[in-house]
Amino acid sequence: MGATTENGSKADNGSTAGLKFLIYGRTGWIGGLLGGLCADRGIPFVYGAGRLENRAQIEADIADAAPTHVINAAGVTGRPNVDWCETHRVETIRANVVGTLTLADVCRERGLILINYATGCIFEYDGAHPLGSGVGFVEEDTPNFVGSFYSKTKAMVEELLKNYENVCTLRVRMPISSDLSNPRNFITKITRYEKVVDIPNSMTILDELLPISIEMAKRNLTGIYNFTNPGVVSHNEILEMYRDYIDPNFTWKNFTLEEQAKVIVAPRSNNELDTAKLKKEFPELLPIKESLIKYVFQPNQKTSTT
């Protein structure tokens, strides 16, 4: 089994010369967006065809593609949500733990950097990081959220990947994009819920951060990065923006975490991640609320000037 061929649609320029990405996660949301970004930037890329847990298939993909970098946007998050992972534990381990570790190991053997899209949903507010304090979890902190099996597997694999000096782990949280029709988009999800909680969280604006991840590959960065926009935003603040920019007649209802617990199987992570490390590397990174307006709500605006 070999890699599936794609090509950058524009001629290489100096900043992309010599690059070639092997991307896993073609059918996923982030994987698809990455292919589009590479094509726009003239970066040659192919999508991996092998299953991550199958070492021989991964080795064949790399041999066929001869990439400069490998990017992993594959894995199991569960459909329609992470509750699926509670009843499909072996499948979750196979993809999120065995598969990711196999890919990292094969890449290390071949001297390749792996950009791994992971999750920041491995923390929850605690005494040292209280809600509303502005004190976020840093990259070196030990995960403290074990409420869902999905998060448990992600915390396991992150700890093990620390031993691989070739891996760049990006902690994504509650991803948002300008495509408000995508059911994986956090904004799309909460506009369709009957009721929502209202808790400030760190979140990832993909329109701003995915291009940064490509730049991180070009800079050969490794280690763990909290891959969110600086600051936090609450569910209600997002829905207020949605009402102001998209649908002035939109309404919603809130409920408590205790009420939410009655309609979900596994608890959900709520936290703030410290982004000083990412901000130092990319000073232009916008705070979450500014990024929401610039990249999501202004491009989609349907109301008159707010």
Image (tube, rainbow, N blue to C red):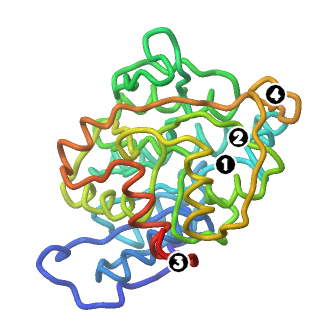
Tell me the CA gap for discs 4 and 3. 38 Å
Q: Is residue 21 left or right of residue 201?
A: left
Residue 92 numbered tag: 2
Residue 76 numbered tag: 1
Please tell me which of labels 4 and 1 falls first in the chain: 1
Q: Residues within 10 Å of mark 4 (few under 14, many from 20)?
A: few
Residue at x 80%, y 23% (from the top left corner) = 258
Q: Is residue 178 left or right of residue 93?
A: left
Helix or strand or loop: what does disc 1 sit on? loop
Q: Is residue 53 left or right of residue 213?
A: right
Tell me the CA gap for discs 3 and 1. 40 Å
Quadrant of residue 145 within the rendered picture: top right
Please tell me which of labels 4 and 3 falls first in the chain: 4
Name the amino acid type tagged 3. Ser
* Residue at far top of view: 127
Please tell me which of labels 4 and 2 falls first in the chain: 2
Residue at x 27%, y 64% (from the top left corner) = 68
Asked if labels 2 and 1 touch by Cβ distance under 8 angstroms, the answer is: yes
Residue underneath mark 3:
304
Q: Residues within 10 Å of mark 3 (few under 14, many from 20)?
A: few
Q: Nearer the viewer, mark 4 or mark 2?
A: 4
Residue 261 numbered tag: 4
Tell me the CA gap for discs 1 and 2. 6 Å
